[in-house]
Image (cartoon, rainbow, N blue to C red):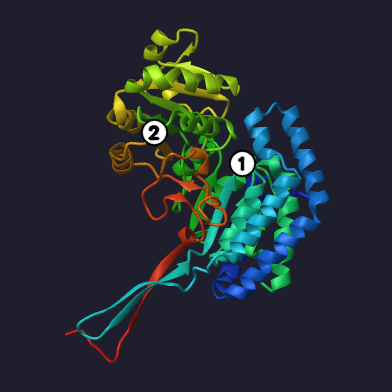
Amino acid sequence: MLEKVTDANGIDALMQDIGAKAKAAARPLAMASPEQKNTALLAMADALDASKATILAANALDMQAGQEAGLAASFLDRLLLNDERIAAMARGLRDVAGLKDPVGEVITEWDRPNGLHIERVRTPLGVIGVIYESRPNVTADAGALCLKAGNAVILRGGSDSIHSSRAIHACMVEGLKAAGLPEKAIQLVPVTDRAAVGALLSGLGGTVDVIVPRGGKSLVARVQAEARVPVFSHLEGICHVYVDASADLEMAKKIVVNAKMRRTGICGSAETLLVDSAAIGTHLQPLLEALTEAGCEVRASATVLKILPFFKPADEEDWRTEYLDAIISVAIVDGVGGAINHIAHYSSNHTEAVIAEDPAVVERFFNEVDSAIVLHNASTQFADGGEFGMGGEIGIATGKMHARGPVGVEQLTSFKYRVRGTGQIRP
């Protein structure tokens, strides 16, 4: 049952209690063996498989409520669970169990002339607060990754996915119990009131070490504005694909259509296509025809419209828009330098791709584009921790401090220095 807490004081007390329990769970979790954590993860995966009917029934409630509330198709796609997506969640948990445990890893070590031996060693961050919308699978992904990295986690899912998240969270707790780990190591905030988010952003009296938001622009903007603890986040996924004149046309068509249309509602979906001016006669029309045939609306720059006047014009706002829909803005640029300049002006520093056979073009793109992920001859939809072999991700970070790109188990750790001496004193 959802807890019914209506007054601000009640919500604050609830959240403070959740924070205290997470802090208490974090210490034994940080000391847990790799085998114990993996036992929990595998038990969680088994519980997801066994609870498929319960999870689907819970998701049906969320889907019905979302449809009645008029949620956009992209949000409903994120919210939807089916047999395949539940199996993918369970597979993700097993993949995380198979990853190398980062806790205690010696990152580097060296000796000083005075005989001191110094090691930099990975340690858990402590307690992580994850705030997310629509995607109930984040309940499993975030819980698993935080656990593997030795962190306790407080999960605050959106009201639109509350029933699904609760059903998945029950499987996570079942896994913790099976491994003899603290049940409060993975907690789901049991209320949907927005005041709970504000309390979590306050740091809950110093019990929360990091906040990770995963959702729309308004959520992430609020977190960045109000958080009193460090934040791993990206504001938007305005991703670009640049097609150079040297690109193989058939490859370019497949990549561009996949980058935009495979799943339009994810942050790695391409939002802008940039075409080399030297490829106007060879690549432009076939690329736009391929997108149109795939059901994508094209919004074209003035230069494109002079050649292909039947598309909808793109305005200044289009270059700054994360559509999360079957819409793409298209511009012609003056070679790779023009593409780099456009990306530098409009990108959210998430993910950009170059399609080219000229190695000099690729190297310049890789060296000068300052985004978290850059790809060559591959779809932007690969911007995903699971596809990177990380066993999933807690999000894509576009900042430049600590974590950047897919946030997996290694990015959910900090480090400390271990210094071993033989009686040295400082003169």
Q: Locate residue 209 relative to residue 34 in the image: left or right.
A: left
Q: Nearer the viewer, residue 281 or 324?
A: 281
Q: Nearer the viewer, residue 2 or 59?
A: 59
Height in image: 300 above or below 144? Answer: above
**Residue at the image position 37 percent from the left and 35 percent from the top:** 356
Q: Secondary structure at mark 1?
A: loop
Q: Residue at x 42, y 22 (%)?
A: 283
Residue at far left of view: 427
- Work out whether residue 293 can be spotted: yes
Residue 415 figure quarter:
bottom left
Amino acid at pointer 1: Glu
Q: Would you say 363 lies left or right of 349 here?
A: left
Q: Which x, y percent locates residue 148?
A: 57, 65
Q: CA distance from mark 1 to mark 2?
A: 23 Å
Label 1 Cα crowd, 10 Å radius (few <14 / some 14-19 / many 20+)? many
Residue at the spot 60% in from the left edge and 22% down from the top edge: 295
Residue 55, numbered circle = none
Q: Where's residue 80, x and y in %?
A: 71, 39
> Can the viewer see residue 183?
no
The residue wearing badge 2 is 347
The first of marks 1 and 2 along the sequence is 1
* Left or right, 376 with reference to 47: left
Q: In screen coordinates, is 163 left or right of 244? A: right
Q: Nearer the viewer, mark 1 or mark 2?
A: 2
Task: Find disc 1 in the rendering and name its residue.
Answer: 133
Characterize the local packing of mark 2: few (<14), some (14-19) or many (20 or more) Cα atoms within 10 angstroms.
Answer: many
| Residue occupying image coordinates x 67% and y 35% | 77
Mark 2 residue element: loop
Which amino acid, mark 2? Ser
Who is closer to the viewer here, 258 or 420? 258
Q: Give percent across and percent down for residue 23.
A: 57, 66
